[in-house]
Amino acid sequence: MTAENRGKILLVDDDKFFLKVMSDAFTGAGFSVVTAADGVLGVEAYAAETFDAVILDLVMPRMGGVSASLEIGRLAKEPDPIIILLTSMFQGAPHEHPIPEMGAKVHIPKSTPPLDIVIIVEQLLERKRRGTGAA
């Protein structure tokens, strides 16, 4: 599949190395990727383009992941956008909430392997396409 039909991902994180690793994982899986170095730039990118999923670090300078996810949710042109918060503040398994917590329904530990994060996003996108449950 080409990037055009796999989806477009917005990655927002102040860690340049982590952005590179995640970007490589998603582009390797056929996704188009846009990166932003903080929440302010992430919100600006979201306002300027259309994305299939947004992945945000929880703790960033200028605007953290919670504020950015809430603003992105407000700007979303579709109901129930796929917004994922990554954090090193918990080490449990990735989990999904029935209603958004801290602006996102999906929370993933930052220690999760990048390819596992790609798989989670693929599953959320497929579920959304099928209409079998919002992410």
Image (spheres, rainbow, N blue to C red):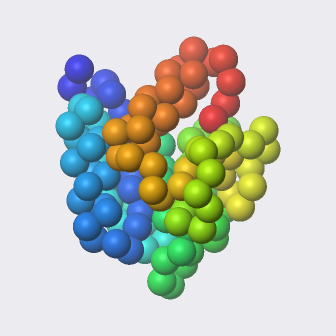
Rendering coords of residue 134 (x, y %):
67, 30
Q: Residue at x 31, y 52 (%)?
A: 22
Residue 8: x and y in percent read 35, 40
Above-or-below relation of 58 to 114: below
Q: Going by the image, does 80 lie left or right of 51?
A: right
In screen coordinates, is 86 left or right of 99? left
Judged left or right of residue 57, residue 93 is right
Q: Determine the residue positioned at 68% across, 41% down.
A: 96
Which residue is farthest bottom? 62
Residue 42 vs 95, above or below: the answer is: below
Q: Quadrant of the C terminus?
A: top right
Residue 44 quadrant: bottom left
Residue at 20% in and 37% down: 28
Q: Position of residue 122 (x, y in %)?
A: 44, 29
| Residue situated in front as seen by the camera: 43 or 113 | 113
**Farthest front residue in view:** 91
Q: Is residue 20 left or right of residue 64?
A: left
Is residue 121 visible to us here? yes
Identify which residue is drawn at 59% across, 44% down. Answer: 94
Is 24 or 71 nearer to us in this picture? 24
Q: Nearer the viewer, residue 60 or 92?
A: 92
Q: Give the position of the N terminus as an image quadrant.
A: top left
Tell me, yes or no, if residue 32 can be seen here. no
Task: Give how far across and how far down residue 40 sits, in percent.
Answer: 47, 74
In this rendering, the count of numbered labels is 0
